[in-house]
Image: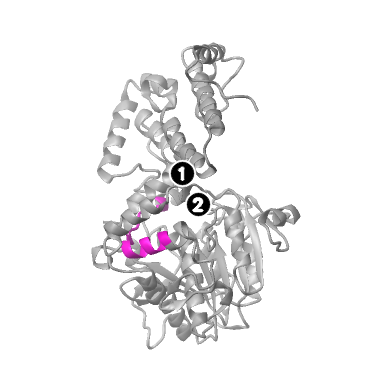
Amino acid sequence: MTAPPNPFDPSTWLSLWTSALNPAAHAPTDRRFAADAWQKDPRFAPLAQGYLQLSSWMNQALAAAPLDERSKAQWAFAMRQVVDAMSPANALATNPEALQTALDSSGASLVEGARLFLADMSRGRIAMSDDQAFEVGRNLATTPGSVVFENALMQLIQYAPATAQVHERPLLIVPPCINKFYILDLQPENSFVAHAVAQGHTVFLVSWRNVGPEQGQLGWDDYLEQGVLQALTVAARISRADRINTLGFCIGGTLLASALAVAAARGEQPAASLTLLTTMLDFSDTGELGLMVDEGLVAAREASIGQGGLLRGRELAQVFAALRANDLIWPYVVNGYLKGQAPAAFDLLFWNGDDTNLPGPMYCWYLRQTYLENKLRESGGTVQCGVPVDLSLIDVPAFVYASREDHIVPWQTAYASTQLLGGDTCFVLGASGHIAGVINPPAKRKRHHWTGALQPEASDWLDGAQQVDGSWWPAWIDWLRAHAGALVAAPRQAGHRDFPVIEAAPGRYVKTAAA
């Protein structure tokens, strides 16, 4: 193995600048430096090339450092934050595109950039989408439906049928409580909810409350009892179905699986099937998010908010953005503040900026039991709602989906769920990331997915998997149909005499901004 360059050796720096001053021989390939000025201008091309070469050397030096793998990964994450911030593209004086834009606009771009900067300062975050372009209930989360139940933690939405007949078993969706539910109901053309309704399913969906100080005492068990288990009960009573098809997305899947395991420990089996989308049940490999979690961090959180208080949604949003700073931070700094270009309207990024809070006790339980100690995968490893939890008692057919480029839930970790559940399980792997891989409507004809017979190891499964063009949604719909029961007349109205309609979807809870 070749030794990494020594940063204290003058010849290292001489080599760096000699290489940088010959940009034609080593043109930058990073997309941040794709413009001609970065490639050909002798004032800026060496900056780009020198920066990329130095970044490469730093990575080589870290790779050769005598550190254990976890420490090395932690240092790599921290170093990437610094290196990304050091990019010459991020400063006006060293960004030829921004300078040219300022000249061409007679300084108007700088004035507009200052306005955008001050606007972001006032809102406390970097805008990634045109905030004026969207409104929940107007052009987002518009699938017709009604709120048929609510408590201090959640509202339950029942969507109106779009077909004359529906399957007798409804579908209950448990979205992540870290963000708002309308990622699954963005606009009509990319709404997962609308697609399921159009296929003849009566869809119920949990809309988690964006909690405030008055809910700061709620714990993980409250999210199971008042959230998932309550929603299952109400959906069953309204639909009069024997059992409910269930779907959980991200931490919503962790909550759903936990709730079903609690029910199983009580001798109940309310679900007919279980779908998990980009969900972790085994937290052995949690990617870069897990690098931030250690005993010191968890203990500090428990001391500060573990007995009551809030984890602010803005803090979580900053953590997730840092995982992909060159996608979710610096492009908006450069285009907005340096070039004066306001972000375009993009529904997914509008949703991404709609922060939600979590109760401190709930968050601390989750952090310790999963990311830190990985107890959920163990039979009896956790006690939830007063009973020991064993995921293998969830003896229902399961559909487990993961996204291959997911930076939040590594696909191999999602695959591990197939070895924990007690029923017949299938696994589908989609292209793209945590959100874009899931929100992939068939009409777009984008991306592809893989299917195959289960194997003990994720790598073996991938070796034998078959690539299929297009969205994974049709495969899931086909699978769900087998567990949805016979077709019956669609209900003429939402709710039940014991659960009358409270208000129209999407309801009040989803419109509450994080305080």
Identified at 75% across, 55% down, the residue is 464
Secondary-structure class at tag 1: helix
Which part of the image, by quadrant, shows the C terminus? bottom left
- The answer to whether 94 is drawn above or below residue 507 in the figure is above
Q: Nearer the viewer, residue 162 or 236?
A: 236
Left or right: 100 as drawn, with respect to 303: right
How many angstroms separate mark 1 from mark 2 (CA)? 8 Å
Prevailing SS of the magenta stretch: helix
Q: Residue at x 54, y 11 (%)?
A: 18
Give the amino acid type for the residue marked by disc 1 in the picture.
Leu
When the figure is inspected, residue 2 is found, relative to residue 477, above or below; the finding is above
Residue 228 position by quadrant = bottom left
Residue hosting label 1 = 323
N-term mark: 1 or 2 = 1
Looking at the rendering, the stretch of residues picked out in magenta corresponds to 351-368
- Say which amino acid is labelled 2: Ile
- Whether label 1 touches label 2, CB < 8 Å: yes
Residue 356 belongs to the span the image colors magenta:
yes
Secondary structure beneath dot 2 equals: loop
Residue 477 in view: yes
Q: Position of residue 367 (x, y in %)?
A: 41, 59
* Left or right, 20 with reference to 328: right
The percent position of residue 203, horizontal first and vertical second, equals: 50, 73
Q: Which residue is mark 2?
A: 408
Check residue 294 for magenta coloring. Answer: no
Q: Can residue 354 be seen from the camera position used here?
A: no
